[in-house]
Every structure is written in C-alpha cells, then in structure tokens.
Image (cartoon, rainbow, N blue to C red):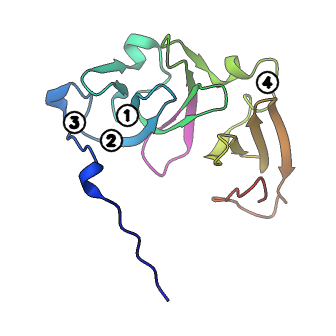
C-alpha cells in the first residue's frame, strides 16, 4: 500500500532570492549547504554564497574560477566545495574548481589532488556523491575513482565496450 508522509510546513522558512537581492544571475543550476550553514548557489554567472541576508559572489574574473557556468556543487569530507563547470546542463564537464568556503581560495582539481595527479590529467565525465560525502568520478577512459578522507583512489575500470552515463553508489557498492 502506498504511504504518504507529511511535514509541518509551518516550520519551513522559505525566501525568494533574486538578482535584485544580489544574486549574480537569475538562472540557478546548483545548491549546496556547507557545514557552517551557508547556502552556495551555482548560476550561469558565478558562485554565490548566501548567509540569509547577504550574497557574496565568486566569478572567473574576481576569484579566478575556471568558468562562470556552474552546474554542480559538492561538499567533500574536508569541507571543500567541488564546483563543477559545464557549458550547458547536459554537456561534458569542462573543469572542476575546489573552493575553500572560509577563505574563498580557489584551486584547480589538479592542485587539490597533488600528488595524486592521475585523475586530474583525465577528462571527467561524471561526478556523484554518496551520503558519507565521498565523491566518485568517472573518467573518459571508464575509470571510477573515489575521493574520501584518505585521498583519491581508483575503484574500478569499466569494460571499454560499455558506455556509462550514469551510476549509483549505495553503501560503497555500485
């Protein structure tokens, strides 16, 4: 039998945030809460940090992001933001920036993963995250890597005759 779960909507605190409030662009592609309570907003023109009152904007021009087109934001086990850049929603990943949410320092994925450069040199096709905040990447050569507290390591290589555009991680099982 189907189940319906209800929540008390009176406890929700919803607020519309617009460009008039300081948002860098009206098109929002990604949202992520960090461990300090900030809301990070990825738009077609930069990364926005919202504290409930004020918006700080990070762009390619102001903070040296690799791109202003942000389509995903992940918070890793080190409380660093993985900012995923694409040209359009379903296009390939063009770059990944690592942003320190406290200092706003921006690094490339290659700089962040040093000395584990193996993945940084490859084209990343897909990035997902599990409930433990481990990040899994699929590269163009069909290799799946996992980034966790101990760093980055190769998990498996998919057969070359298969094309993977989606995978799901549940309790570290594919």
Viewer-closest of 130 and 62: 130
Tag 1 residue: 41
Q: Nearer the viewer, mark 2 or mark 4?
A: 2
- Which circle marks residue 117 in the picture? 4
Tag 3 residue: 17
Q: Are marks 1 and 3 in contact (CB under 8 Å)?
A: yes
Q: CA distance from mark 1 to mark 3?
A: 10 Å
- Marked residue nearer the N-terminal end (4 or 3): 3
| Quadrant holding the C terminus | bottom right
Query: Callout 1: helix, strand or loop?
Result: strand
- Marked residue nearer the N-terminal end (2 or 4): 2
Name the residue located 84 percent from the left edge and 46 percent from the top edge: 155
Question: Which residue lies most toward the left here?
Answer: 20
Q: CA distance from mark 3 to mark 2?
A: 10 Å
Q: Is residue 85 left or right of residue 22?
A: right
Q: Is residue 34 left or right of residue 44?
A: right
- Which circle marks residue 28 in the picture? 2
Magenta range is 83-96
Vertical comparison of 37 with 136: above or below? above
Q: CA distance from mark 4 to mark 3?
A: 39 Å
Q: Are marks 2 and 1 in contact (CB under 8 Å)?
A: yes
Name the residue located 49 percent from the left edge and 14 percent from the top edge: 102
* Residue 60 part of the magenta-drawn span: no
Q: Nearer the viewer, mark 4 or mark 3?
A: 3
- Coordinates of residue 130 in the picture (x, y in percent): 65, 48
């Amino acid at each position: 039998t189907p189940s319906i779960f209800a929540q008390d909507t009176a406890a929700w605190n919803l607020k519309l945030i617009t460009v008039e409030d300081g948002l860098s662009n009206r098109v929002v592609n990604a949202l992520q809460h960090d461990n300090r309570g900030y809301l990070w907003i990825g738009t077609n023109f930069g990364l926005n940090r919202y504290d409930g009152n004020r918006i700080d904007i990070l762009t390619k021009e102001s903070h040296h992001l690799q791109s202003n087109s942000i389509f995903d934001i992940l918070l890793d086990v080190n409380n660093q933001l993985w900012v995923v850049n694409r040209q359009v929603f379903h296009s390939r990943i063009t770059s990944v920036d690592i942003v320190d949410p406290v200092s706003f320092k921006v690094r490339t994925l290659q700089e962040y993963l040093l000395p584990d450069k193996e993945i940084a040199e490859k084209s990343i096709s897909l990035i997902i995250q599990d409930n433990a905040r481990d990040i899994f990447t699929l590269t163009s050569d069909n290799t799946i890597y996992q980034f966790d507290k101990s760093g980055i390591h190769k998990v498996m290589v998919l057969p070359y005759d298969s094309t993977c555009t989606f995978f799901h991680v549940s309790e570290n099982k594919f």
